[in-house]
């Protein structure tokens, strides 16, 4: 049947309406299941500009079309009047007419008009269609793969846009915190930050790239000045003007040195004598009080001790990754992350570090002092507190360094802070 026979004379025809009518008139319609078509159409609707009442109308039509009508020899036609659709959507018939025209022009539906303009479906006694006039989903079957690719592309674009917006927020906060921590010498970076943020015609992706470059430049400048200041301090502390000091004479009898040397050698020799038979380590543990208990407990705390020694192990008492995930919910939502395990938390440290304006050298120093697990946990806590109450923490980087110092003194109660955040 030609497209001219499918479109009533009273319709104002456009290029999109003619294209859909041409697809509806083609033979050998692709076999597409109703369930698959519905999912793709709902995913691609935002990319096609189908929203609001038009999306509501599409949802109603997908609910009314029969799954068997997508089989060979039948047509996926919905015979419902504009008046009934207006009652379902609580809109005027004129609004429904505009929505249907939108769905036809984007290639989802086609007008299959009867000679009288009415919409109806006649079936014979065998259940097959004799006549079907109304709104035809045949164009959507032909455009199924194109809609599927368009929906995937739209989702990728939306995800990239969201990541770019998060990056703009992250680098902006990092720059402000860095300048607040370092003083007025870095105020120029705030001015440049405001200029970039005020560029409304700049895409978020490009804006994020510029802010990242500005932040890295500020960090590089700070590190260069720190290295220069350290070099000047070393020059000032040279030994050019030192006072000569006479050496102290040794007053300890040499016998004590000899006895200490003999005692040390004897202990080392005792362990060395057993080194060849493979039992040196086990016997060394057994010679210590509670050696058997130490051997049993060591595997349990091996990861903690390897991360930061006894201090890190003590400071992580009562701290679990589940507690961190519950306490730091805001920062996970802000960055689009999930702290489901320690590895995911450690992988997110670069983003957390930039969020609080902490330099890579500052974080590396914390890792070397207390291990990567404790450093990552402290970083997450500081970022969460700074996000919830930015007025109370004026220098998140300094707050983080203070936590690491308290951990070194054994005065850090990280589990209490996490429970307080929960």
Image (cartoon, rainbow, N blue to C red):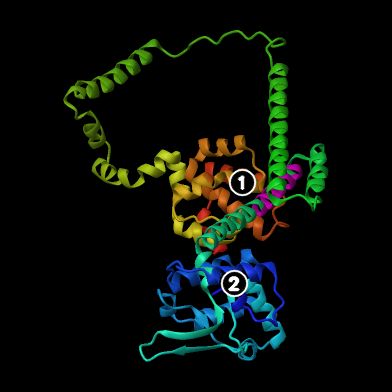
Q: Give the range drawn in magenta.
A: 165-180
- Give yes or no for residue 3 being in the magenta stretch: no
Q: Mark 2 points at which residue?
A: 21
Residue 242, how many percent across, how many down? Answer: 69, 11
Residue 109 quadrant: bottom right
Label 1 or label 2, whichever comes before in sequence order: 2
Tell me residue 326's x, y (percent).
51, 62
Say which residue label 1 marks: 400
x 64%, y 42%: residue = 358
| Left-right relation of 200 to 337 | right
Q: In which quarter of the image is residue 272?
A: top left
How far apart are labels 1 and 2 at the CA level?
Answer: 66 Å
Q: How crowded is mark 1: few (under 14 residues within 10 Å), some or many (20 or more)?
A: many
Q: Main secondary structure of the magenta part?
A: helix
Picture layout, residue 71 above or below residue 84 = above
Q: Is mark 2 on a helix, strand or loop?
A: helix
Relative to 241, 39 lies left or right: left
The relative height of residue 289 versus residue 43 in the rendered view (above or below) is above
């Amino acid at each position: 049947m030609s497209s001219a026979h499918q479109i009533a004379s009273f319709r104002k025809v456009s290029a999109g309406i003619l294209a859909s009518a041409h697809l509806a008139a083609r033979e050998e319609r692709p076999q597409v299941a109703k369930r698959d078509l519905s999912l793709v159409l709902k995913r691609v609707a935002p990319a096609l500009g189908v929203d609001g009442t038009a999306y509501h109308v599409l949802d109603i039509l997908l609910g009314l079309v029969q799954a068997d009508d997508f089989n060979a020899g039948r047509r996926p036609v919905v015979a419902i009047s504009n008046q009934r659709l207006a009652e379902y959507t609580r809109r005027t018939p004129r609004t429904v007419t505009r929505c249907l025209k939108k769905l036809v022009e984007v290639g989802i539906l086609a007008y299959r008009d009867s000679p009288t303009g009415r919409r109806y479906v006649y079936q014979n006694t065998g259940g097959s269609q004799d006549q079907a006039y109304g709104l035809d989903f045949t164009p959507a079957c032909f455009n199924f793969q194109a809609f599927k690719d368009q929906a995937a592309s739209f989702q990728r674009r939306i995800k990239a846009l969201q990541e770019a917006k998060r990056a703009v927020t992250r680098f902006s906060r990092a720059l402000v915190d860095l300048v607040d921590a370092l003083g007025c010498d870095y105020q120029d970076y705030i001015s440049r930050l405001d200029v970039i943020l005020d560029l409304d015609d700049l895409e978020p992706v490009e804006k994020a790239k510029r802010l990242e470059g500005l932040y890295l430049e500020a960090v590089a400048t700070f590190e260069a000045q720190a290295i220069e200041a350290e070099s000047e301090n070393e020059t000032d502390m040279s030994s050019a003007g030192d006072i000569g000091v006479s050496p102290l004479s040794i007053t300890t009898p040499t016998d004590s040195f000899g006895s200490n040397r003999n005692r040390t050698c004897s202990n080392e020799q005792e362990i060395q004598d057993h080194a060849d038979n493979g039992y040196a380590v086990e016997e060394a543990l057994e010679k210590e009080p509670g050696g058997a208990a130490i051997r049993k407990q060591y595997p349990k705390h091996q990861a903690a001790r390897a991360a930061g020694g006894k201090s890190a192990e003590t400071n992580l008492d009562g701290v679990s990754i589940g507690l961190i995930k519950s306490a730091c919910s805001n920062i996970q939502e802000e960055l689009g992350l999930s702290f489901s395990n320690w590895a995911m938390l450690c992988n997110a440290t670069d983003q957390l570090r930039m969020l609080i304006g902490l330099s890579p050298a500052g974080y590396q120093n914390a890792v070397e002092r207390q291990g990567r697990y404790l450093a990552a946990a402290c970083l997450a806590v500081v970022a969460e507190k700074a996000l919830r109450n930015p007025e109370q923490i004026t220098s998140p980087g300094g707050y983080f360094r203070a936590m690491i110092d308290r951990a070194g003194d054994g005065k850090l109660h990280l589990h209490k802070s996490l429970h307080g955040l929960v």
